């Protein structure tokens, strides 16, 4: 196989991964479902492009500030984070499905606003975004994103978020500020999505509101669930597998998307908790998995012994 | 359970291997094509790929084409991109990197043709877009993209033609526009129609929009009716055209409707019926032109259905490519791209003379078609001035 093609898919997987990691914190660890994260990606992509695109020299072309890429990444992430704070203030008091619908509305509204605002090219899109995303930048951002998230989840804050996911009322009684932790999870996930958007825009060199439709949001949520709720390594695996799968299935021609759907269903049936539901591929995680397995086996043996000696006791 | 997961991963691995296979055949020129084979634009994608396959088979039946004194067979490698920009990038990387094609035909959507430019440049593979009418497909900030070409006219031209025809020939002074705000093609045409029409001295009395997927256009149409225009410009695709035209007639709007190259389709007539009767649209060609009759008949004979608009344009894209290959004298993307810049051939959609600093076919006249008794009747070749 050719390198540019594989590199391209890996970069896309890496970019998806950043957004998925953020969503993993929100959905997998805090228990809030979102169908609007493509909206945060869009905000990141457009603000990032605004920072890095060189100033306009021709009438009819859309100019930016011409700053280095790092400013684009920071500004894109920050902008998405700030917007998410406002959205969170309004919607985080909503419970369960209602929050989900509110995020869906936000995502679609963002896309429609971008369609209507002609400053950034409207539906015709914004061509000429510099090609700054490289395998190295995507990889570095991925590593930082994973490390930050892993440490956050392990910290007191992370445990509080899991408490909110498991039983909101109990967490509140135990003294966890539920609203605050939901807010933190939302902002972190929005920043991640924003950064992913910046990298996506600078990979494609062209951004169009159409790219950030509800399909994109759903795709991200599917990856999180596919990888396994509450598992960072699951999200990594999920992003890699589900981004590469449609390309691997090219041999099936027009039946490709049917096979894609079938493959996802088969895997979800055989692993209902997702690829890595609740487990981690870290030394501690593997120890935990093995310990659980030993405990399960011991339990089984005990049950068998009891069954064997059943009548006598 | 674990067995099943294992089977799954084996299946995926097998597919990956199949994807890698495919040895190099001598004496074959590989040409890439991509477009939508799934999704709402699949009709056009299938039509394009079928046309390319048919033409290549015809060339091969005659013993192939001669490039640099050697005979070659032509082979098309076609991929689906769902009409999605991200997949367009993936597919272009696959065609240039893995399949090592010498040139790419398609896509039909501007939003898919724009992001592939840097990949084409890196791989030195030229691309001929079919109906991608956004100017930025080939020219960006006044600089021509070295590996992007197209075979159709562009949006500013199409918008100017529609506006000019409405003003000069139909005698319209007040125009209303209804457009799809979420569609790049529709926004482009609206922008250029508006500019040309007001420049000519006309007035835009209503400028209403809807979103892709909408099925009720009555609120916008009511406003348009109140503004009492002479003509209503509807720059979007046939499905919405049929729906909105029917609703306009229901509301008692009797004015002439005017459209662009998103109109022509078998479905427009069957869905629109009487509502689109007597309306005009800008097209790339005249369907009754003797030059296209032969292709139409061959297509119908082979596939059992009528060709769509895209087929005519991809037909000429193939002619352009074959001509460029012959003149380049070698099977090499860079040489072909260079030859393409001096293209001057007679296609079935008109004379195609590629402008060196625009990579567009220069001076290609637009055809104005009128719908009469459910038929597309050619009015005239009209050039905007």
Image: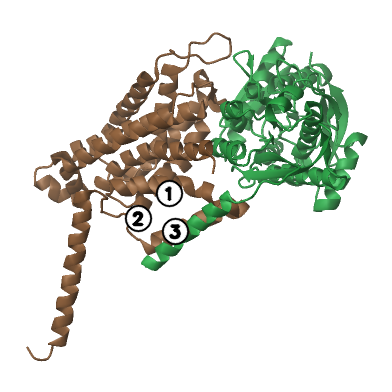
Chain colours: A brown, B green
Task: Check chain identity for marks 1 and 3: say if they share one.
Answer: no
* Residue at image coords 56%, 15%: A61
Chain designation of label 1:
A
Which of the two residues, B229 or B367, is positioned nearer the viewer here? B367
Instruction: Name the residue carrying label 1.
Output: A241
Above or below: residue A202 compared with residue B27: above
Instruction: Name the residue carrying label 3.
Output: B9
Q: Are marks 1 and 2 in contact (CB under 8 Å)?
A: yes
Q: Where's residue B105, x and y in %?
A: 70, 35
Left or right, A106 with respect to B105, comes to left
Chain designation of label 3:
B
Q: Report the residue that reaches farthest toward the bottom.
A: A312
Chain designation of label 2:
A
Q: Are marks 2 and 3 in contact (CB under 8 Å)?
A: no
Instruction: Name the residue carrying label 2.
Output: A275
Quadrant containing the N terminus of chain B is bottom left
């Amino acid at each position: 196989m050719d390198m540019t093609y594989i590199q391209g898919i890996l970069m896309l997987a890496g970019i998806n991964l950043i957004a998925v990691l953020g969503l993993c914190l929100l959905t997998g660890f805090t228990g809030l479902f979102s169908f609007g994260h493509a909206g945060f990606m869009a905000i990141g992509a457009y603000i990032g492009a605004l920072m890095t695109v060189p100033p306009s020299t021709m009438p009819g072309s859309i100019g930016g500030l011409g700053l280095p890429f790092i400013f684009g990444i920071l500004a894109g992430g920050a902008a998405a984070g700030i917007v998410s704070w406002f959205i969170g203030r309004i919607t985080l008091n909503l419970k369960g499905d209602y929050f989900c619908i509110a995020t869906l509305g936000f995502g679609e509204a963002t896309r429609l606003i971008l369609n209507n605002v002609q400053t950034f090219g409207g539906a015709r899109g914004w061509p000429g975004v510099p090609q700054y995303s490289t395998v190295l930048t995507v990889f570095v951002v991925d590593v930082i994103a994973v490390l930050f998230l892993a440490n956050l989840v392990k910290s007191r804050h992370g445990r509080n978020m899991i408490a909110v996911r498991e039983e909101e009322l109990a967490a509140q009684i135990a003294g966890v500020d539920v609203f605050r932790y939901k807010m933190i999870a939302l902002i972190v996930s929005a920043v991640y999505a924003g950064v992913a958007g910046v990298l996506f825009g600078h990979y494609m060199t062209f951004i169009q509101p159409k790219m950030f439709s509800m399909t994109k949001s759903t795709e991200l949520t599917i990856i999180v669930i596919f990888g396994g709720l509450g598992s960072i390594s699951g999200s990594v695996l999920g992003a890699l597998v589900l981004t590469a799968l449609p390309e691997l299935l090219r041999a099936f021609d027009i039946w490709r998307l049917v096979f894609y759907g079938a493959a996802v269903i088969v895997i979800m049936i055989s692993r209902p908790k997702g690829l890595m539901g609740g487990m981690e591929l870290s030394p501690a995680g593997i120890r935990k998995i093995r310990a659980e397995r030993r405990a399960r086996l011991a339990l089984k043996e005990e049950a068998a012994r009891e069954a064997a000696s059943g009548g006598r006791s | 359970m674990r067995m099943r997961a294992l089977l799954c991963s084996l299946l995926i691995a097998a597919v990956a291997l199949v994807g890698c296979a495919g040895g190099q055949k001598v004496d074959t020129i590989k040409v890439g094509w991509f477009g939508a084979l799934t999704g709402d634009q699949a009709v056009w994608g299938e039509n394009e790929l079928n046309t390319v396959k048919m033409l290549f088979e015809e060339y091969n039946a005659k013993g192939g084409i001669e490039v640099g004194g050697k005979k070659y067979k032509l082979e098309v490698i076609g991929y689906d991109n769902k009409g999605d920009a991200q997949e367009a990038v993936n597919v272009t990387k696959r065609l240039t990197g893995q399949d090592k094609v010498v040139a790419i035909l398609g896509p039909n959507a501007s939003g898919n043709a724009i992001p592939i430019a840097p990949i084409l440049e890196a791989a030195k593979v030229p691309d001929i877009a079919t109906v991608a009418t956004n100017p930025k497909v080939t020219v960006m900030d006044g600089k021509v993209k070295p590996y992007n070409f197209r075979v159709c006219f562009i949006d500013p031209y199409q918008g100017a033609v529609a506006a000019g025809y409405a003003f000069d020939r139909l005698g319209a002074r007040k125009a209303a526009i209804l457009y799809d705000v979420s569609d790049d093609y529709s926004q482009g045409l609206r922008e250029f129609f508006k500019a040309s029409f007001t420049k000519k001295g006309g007035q835009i009395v209503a400028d209403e929009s809807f979103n892709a997927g909408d099925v009720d256009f009555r609120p916008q149409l009511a406003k348009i009716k109140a503004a009492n225009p002479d003509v209503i410009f509807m720059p979007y695709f046939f499905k919405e055209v049929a729906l909105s035209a029917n609703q306009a007639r229901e509301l008692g709007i009797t004015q002439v409707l005017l459209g662009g190259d998103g109109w022509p389709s078998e479905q427009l007539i069957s869905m629109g019926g009487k509502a689109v009767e007597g309306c005009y649209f800008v097209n790339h060609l005249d369907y009754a032109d003797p030059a296209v009759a032969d292709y139409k008949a061959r297509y119908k004979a082979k596939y059992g259905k009528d060709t769509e608009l895209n087929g005519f344009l991809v037909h000429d894209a193939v002619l352009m490519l074959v001509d460029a290959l012959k003149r380049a004298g070698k099977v090499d993307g860079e040489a072909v791209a260079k030859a393409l810049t001096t293209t001057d051939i007679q296609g079935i959609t008109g004379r195609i003379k590629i402008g060196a600093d625009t990579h567009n076919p220069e001076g290609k006249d637009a055809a104005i078609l009128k719908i009469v008794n459910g038929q597309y009747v050619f009015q005239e070749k009209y050039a905007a001035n």
